[in-house]
Amino acid sequence: MTAKMNRRTLISALTVGGLVAATGANAKAKPSRPFFERINQPIGLQLYALGDAPAQDLEGTFHKVAAIGYREIEFSSLYGHDAKFVRAAADRAGLSLTCFHLQSAGNGGTGPLTLDSDPQHIADTMGILGIKKTVMPIFLFPQGFNPGPGNEAFLKAMFQALPAAGQGIWKRTAALLNDRAAKLQPHGITLGYHNHGFEFAPIGGTNGWQILTQETDPALVDFELDIGWLGSAGVDPLPFLRRYGKRIKQLHVKDILPPQSDDPALAMSPTQVGDGILDWARILPASVELGVQHFYVEQEPPFAIPRIEAITRSYNYLARLCA
C-alpha cells in the first residue's frame, strides 16, 4: 500500500479473486433463514455514518435508527449531553449502547472523555451508558502532525507523514493500548483498536497491523476490523479473518466500489452495504465462526444519497441476507 500502487488494478484483481459473491458450480446453497435472524444477533450502527444528525437531535436520531431496525449503537461522543441523558434517550428508543470510541488526547481528543482520562472516570461513564467495550479509533499521530480541514486533506497529509514516521508510531500506539487496556481491565472495561487503510502500508518488510498485533497483549487488546478499509487497502478479507480472527471481536460492516483513483489517500469509494464488491455472504459467516461478537454498519462520505437512506438500505440488505 504505497502512493505509487495502482489500486484500481489491485482491487479489480481481488474482485475477481474472491471479494465478490461466488457463482455457478462453486456457489453454496443459501440457508433458508436470514443470517442475522439465524445467529440471533442484532445489527448495529456506528453513529459516525449519520454525520451531524446526532449532535443536532440525538433523541430524534435514536428513534429514526430504531425505526429502521437497528438495535445496537456504537458512538464516539456524548454530543454535549451527560451520560445519563444519552442512556435514557437510547432506552426510550429501544436501543442498546454497546461500544464507545475513545480518541487519544495526543490526537486532539477533547471533551470530558478521552482514552487518557482517569480509568475510574471512563468506567463510571461507561457504567451509566451500559457499555463494557471501548475502542481506540486510530493510531497515535506523528508528532506535530497537522492534517488540515476535511477528510480528504487528512488522508493526504497522513500518507505523506507516514514514511518518515516509520515503525515508531505503531510501537507507541501498541504501548498505549497495552497500558490503557491494563488500567481499564480491573473496571470490567475492554479496549480494542480500529483500523483504517494506513495499517497495511509496507514499512521495511512489515506494516502497522503486524506491529500492532505482535506488540499488543492478546489478553488485553483486541481489534475491531473495518472491512471496507481492509478491502480498499487491497487485502482479501477471508484469508485475513482466518489468520487474525481470534483477536477480532467486532466488525465495521462497510462496503466499497472499485476505487476511481490510483492515489491511496483517495482509494475508498464508499457505498451502501450490498451495493459494492464485498462478499458478505462469505465474510459474515466466517467472522462468526472465528468469534466476532458485534457488527456495526458504517459508511464513509461522500454519500450519493441522504445518509439516513443509505443506512436504511444497508440495514435492509443485511436483514434479508441469507448466508
Image (tube, rainbow, N blue to C red):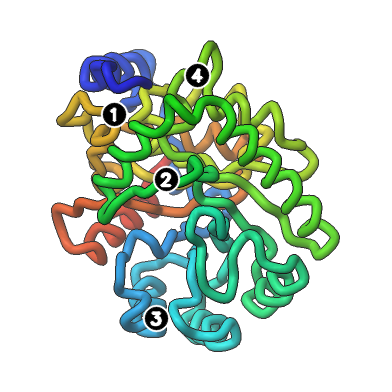
> Where 122 sits versus 163, above or below?
below
Amino acid on which the number 1 mark rests in the picture: Pro
Q: Secondary structure at mark 4?
A: strand
Nearer to us of marks 4 and 1 is 4
Q: Secondary structure at mark 2?
A: loop
Q: Secondary structure at mark 3?
A: helix
What residue would you read off at disc 2? Answer: 145
Residue under the image location 46 percent in, 41 percent down = 226
Residue 290 % position (x, y) = 64, 34
Which residue occupies the extreme right position in the image?
Answer: 186
Q: Quadrant of residue 22?
A: top left
Q: Quadrant of residue 122?
A: bottom right
User: Which callout, 2 or 1, points at the residue further toward the start of the chain?
Assistant: 2
What residue would you read off at disc 1? Answer: 264
Residue under the image location 65 percent in, 59 percent down = 133
Amino acid on which the number 2 mark rests in the picture: Phe
Nearer to us of marks 2 and 3 is 2
Residue under the image location 75 percent in, 36 percent down = 218
Amino acid on which the number 3 mark rests in the picture: Leu
User: Which callout, 1 or 3, points at the residue further toward the start of the chain?
Assistant: 3
User: Which callout, 4 or 2, points at the residue further toward the start of the chain?
Assistant: 2
What residue would you read off at disc 4? Answer: 203
Nearer to us of marks 3 and 4 is 4
* Residue 58 circle label: 3
User: Which callout, 4 or 1, points at the residue further toward the start of the chain?
Assistant: 4
Nearer to us of marks 4 and 2 is 2
Q: Would you say residue 97 is visible in this rendering?
A: yes
Mark 4–mark 2 Cα distance, whole angstroms, equals 19 Å
